[in-house]
Amino acid sequence: MLSRSMFRGAISKLSLRQKLAMLALVGVFLPLCILTYMQYHSLAELRDKTKVAFKDNLRQGQTILEQRMKQRLQDIAAQTLSPVAGKHVASEELEEYFADVKHSHAEIEEIFAFAYRNDTQKTDGYAYLYPDKFQTIAQAKFTPAQSHILFLFDKSRADQNFLDGNRQYLFLYDSSPISGMLQGTYLFYPLNDLGKGSQIGFAGVLLNEHFVKDQLIAGTIKPLVASHSPRFAVTISDESQHVLYSNGPPKNGYLVQNNLDRPFSNWKAAIGLLDTNVDDLARDSFLHSAGATLLVLVFLLGGIALTIRATDREARLAQAKSNFVANVSHELKTPLSLISLFSEILELGRVNKEEKKAEYYGIIRHESRRLNKTIDNILDFSRIEAGRKTYQLVAGDVAAVIDSVLSTYRYQIINSGFDIQTDIQPDLPPVLIDRDAIAQAISNLLDNAIKYSGKVKQISITARVLGSQLSIVIADHGAGIPRAEQAKIFEKFYRVGNGLVHDVKGSGLGLSLVKHIIEAHGGAISVDSDEGKGSRFTILLPLASRSVDA
């Protein structure tokens, strides 16, 4: 079994990038995969439940339809029948009121009122069918039409077909095939004796058939259907299978078929979809949800990848800074140690020969310049990072700058056994440069060529005009740079990840400074290198006339 110490030991051997990859895999991608799997199953279950939910929504829509039709009928009953309360049934006042109602309400086909003389037995009473006059008629002498209306009123009351919560208005749809009877939609209003609290009769209306079909049913359904997508196929029929309303057949059959609630219990509603079916809707809903989930997942993965990349970059930068401190400490300590050593030897008078003294003085001067160059690089880098580094560009001779740099490195070149060949075009045109900055850039490139040349100690420096630019090429035959890392060598603190990093000390700032200097002059720098065959750095600077124009 893997112990905790063994686990920690295995983790400590991993590189920073490997640790980040493991953290991303265990802490991010694995939970994300589990979450995605669960989301997929949740969407699949939702797809199956969509059909049931859709049918429930259809039933809710049916309930809204019933409520709106009831409200419409309540309004008609309140406007036409409520004023009858308090009026004597067998009166001219009521006759005039009924005449006015039928004249002003086009939806009224017939209007009538019944009053009982005997409250308990209802053996005779008044019957009125407009435009007939009121007359006292025994129930046994009622006409078939009058008896049918009385029957319908009693049936609606027995069925509890009330339109409102106060139980004031009754509704009944009559579709019985009785010859001579007025069939259709009835509204009833029971008349009560307010003093005794007993029923003394009822009033009612027969609604126009076109009003019921075209305005009550169709006028209520159409706005509901138009406000929803996809489009619904709705059919309303009575108990005799007569179609009261239909906007077309469904594509794949009806989804809901049932009777409406009271008071419309003898009407049947059938609802389906005109242009699609519920399976397609469920699939489309699933695909849309899955697409949205996938889009969120892509953005999330992209954000995680960018975060991991930034973390890796910052971690590598922190490591590079740590290496930079160690390398700079060595870069500063080595020349200081040599200067201190040879100064002490000369101070103690242990060297008698003038040639030896001159050699030691040369070493001290060389190491002082080397120390000064390292400090200049660090200070320049600090100014660049703070945005305070400026350059004074004046027309200058690049050939003279190259000669000055070579004279500075002459001692190191001679003692190291290097062969430096120069190919500088005569009468080079002037270039707008900051002399010290360009000298620093060439010096850094030459210093790298010397440090990484290895056994083949040959360096060439070429300067010539290429079109409207001046080209400076510094080439060596040293270790070279892997192609995968050539794009990174101009980054701050970056050093090529091979054995030379450990064998040759450096700060990792030289090439970064060179790139900044050359670009500040409006130029460009590039590298062409093969591992084990050497490197070739090319600087392109605009000529003075072009720089002035720019």
Image (cartoon, rainbow, N blue to C red):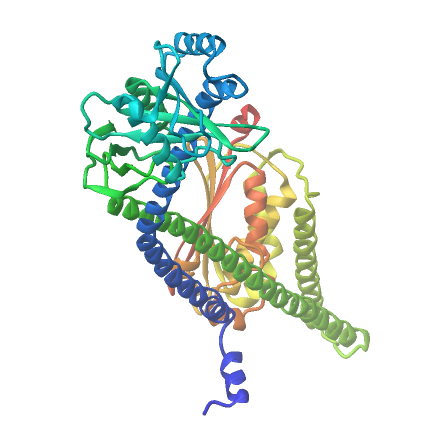
Residue occupying image coordinates x 27% and y 37%: 268
Residue occupying image coordinates x 58% and y 53%: 443
Is residue 519 visible to us here? yes
Q: Nearer the viewer, residue 534 or 330?
A: 330
**Quadrant of the image containing the C terminus:** top right
In this view, 531 is above or below 444: below
* Lateral position of residue 137 relative to residue 86, left or right: left
Residue occupying image coordinates x 27% and y 22%: 145
**Residue 171 at what x, y percent from top left?**
38, 30
Count how many numbered circles sit on residues in the image.
Answer: 0
Is residue 190 visible to us here? no
**Quadrant of the image containing the N terminus:** bottom left
In this view, 544 is above or below 442: above
**Residue 259 at what x, y percent from top left?**
30, 41
In this view, 331 is above or below 161: below
Q: Nearer the viewer, residue 144 or 72?
A: 144
